[in-house]
Image (cartoon, rainbow, N blue to C red):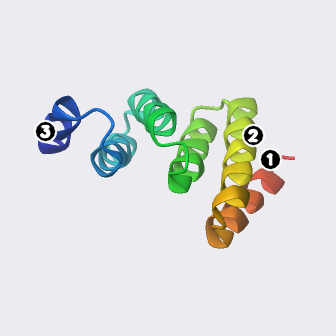
Amino acid sequence: MELLKNMVAQNPTDAFARYGLAMELKNAGDLEGAVQSFQLLITHNPDYAAAYFHGGQTLEKLGRLQDAREIYTKGIETTLKTGDAHTRSELQAALDVLR
């Protein structure tokens, strides 16, 4: 995780490093930190579809269901633009569970 933190510190907009850090934070149980990293990833790389899915899952774990719905919906909109049908179907399934 330290390596990823250093990579993000050197280049905060690097999608690979930011996504890796967010996933490591999520896996380590730092859900708030993970959400912040996913949000920053989306801010700097709005077409990074996996960030919407995993960010939404993390928000669900925090009990922030409305926020999860919103991020899933934004992710679906993004995947419609980028043509990422696989991630779109995952996002739609996650959103359907919350409805």
Q: Which residue is mark 2?
A: 69
In the rendered structure, find residue 2 and report the number of the disc placed on it.
Answer: 3
The structure residue drawn at horizontal position 54% and vertical position 41%, both measured from the top left corner, is 58
Q: Residues within 10 Å of mark 1 (few under 14, many from 20)?
A: few
N-term mark: 2 or 3: 3
Look at mark 1 in the image and give the residue it sits on.
98
- Residue at 72% x, 67% y: name it: 89
Residue 44, image x, y percentages: 44, 35
Q: Is residue 38 left or right of residue 76?
A: left
Residue in the picture at 58% in, 47% down: 52
Q: Nearer the viewer, residue 79 or 35?
A: 79
Residue 57 drawn above or below residue 42: below
In the image, residue 66 above or below residue 97 = above
Lower sequence index among marks 3 and 1: 3
What amino acid is at disc 2?
Arg
Q: The N terminus appears in which quarter of the rendering?
A: top left
Q: Secondary structure at mark 1?
A: helix
Q: Residue at x 77, y 51 (%)?
A: 95
Residue sitting nearer the eye, 98 or 81: 81
Label 2 environment density (alpha carbons within 10 Å; few <14, some 14–19, many ≥20): many
Residue 4 picture location, percent across and down: 19, 43
Q: Which mark is residue 24?
A: none
The three-letter amino acid code for the residue at tag 3 is Glu
Horizontal relation, residue 21 to residue 10: left or right: right
Q: Residue furthest right?
A: 99
Q: Position of residue 97 (x, y in %)?
A: 80, 54
Q: Nearer the viewer, mark 3 or mark 1?
A: 3
Cβ–Cβ under 8 Å for marks 2 and 1: yes
